[in-house]
Image (cartoon, grey):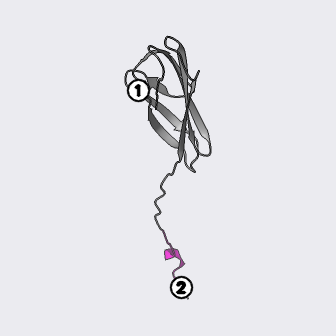
Amino acid sequence: NDTTAGNNNLSESTTLTAASNLEVTKVGTPNPVNGGAEVTWTVTVRNLGPSDVTNTVITEFLPVGVTYLSHITSTGTYVPATALWTIPVLAAGGGSATLTLTVRADGASPLPNT
């Protein structure tokens, strides 16, 4: 028998940790590429995790033996001089972003890019 109902309070703090599962794929066309020809690499990042992610940074260096021509991003910014692609937000459950890089192959194949 609690005669003071006004003091019946309970509080608890719980820390939530964001989780993400990023999938990065890269496709080059044409493959193989001949010296002097253009090649396009398409890099796609998908967030398969249960939480949104912000300010994702992908490093996408160009290999030796190519000359940078252009790039297009579906979101965010790519800076060729630093090779950094910054993506502001990737939504949970499949949010994605794409970076397309076009370069010229300066020499002979093979032209590795990882």
Residue 92 falls in which quadrant of the image?
top right
* Marks 1 & 2, CB-CB < 8 Å contact: no
Mark count: 2
Residue at 47% of width from left, 55% of height from top?
17
Along the line of sight, which residue is nearer the eye, 5 or 28? Answer: 28
Query: Does residue 46 lie above or below 2 as drawn?
Result: above
Q: Residue at x 53, y 12 (%)?
A: 37
Q: SS class of the residue under badge 2?
A: loop
Q: Amino acid at mark 1?
A: Ala
The percent coordinates of residue 58 (x first, y second) are 45, 34
Q: Which residue is mark 1?
A: 83
Q: Nearer the viewer, residue 97 or 24?
A: 24
> Which secondary structure dominates the residues rendered in magenta?
loop
Question: Residue 103 or 35: which is nearer the viewer?
Answer: 35
* First reached walking from the N terminus: tag 1 or tag 2: 2
Work out how far the residue at label 1 is from the one at label 2, CA to CA, in angstroms. 66 Å
Tag 2: amino acid: Asp
Q: Residue furthest top?
A: 36
Residue 2 numbered tag: 2
x and y percentages locating residue 13 in the rendered image = 46, 64
Residue 54 visible in the snapshot: yes
Picture residue at 52% right of the left edge, 48% below the top: 20
Region rendered in magenta: 2-11
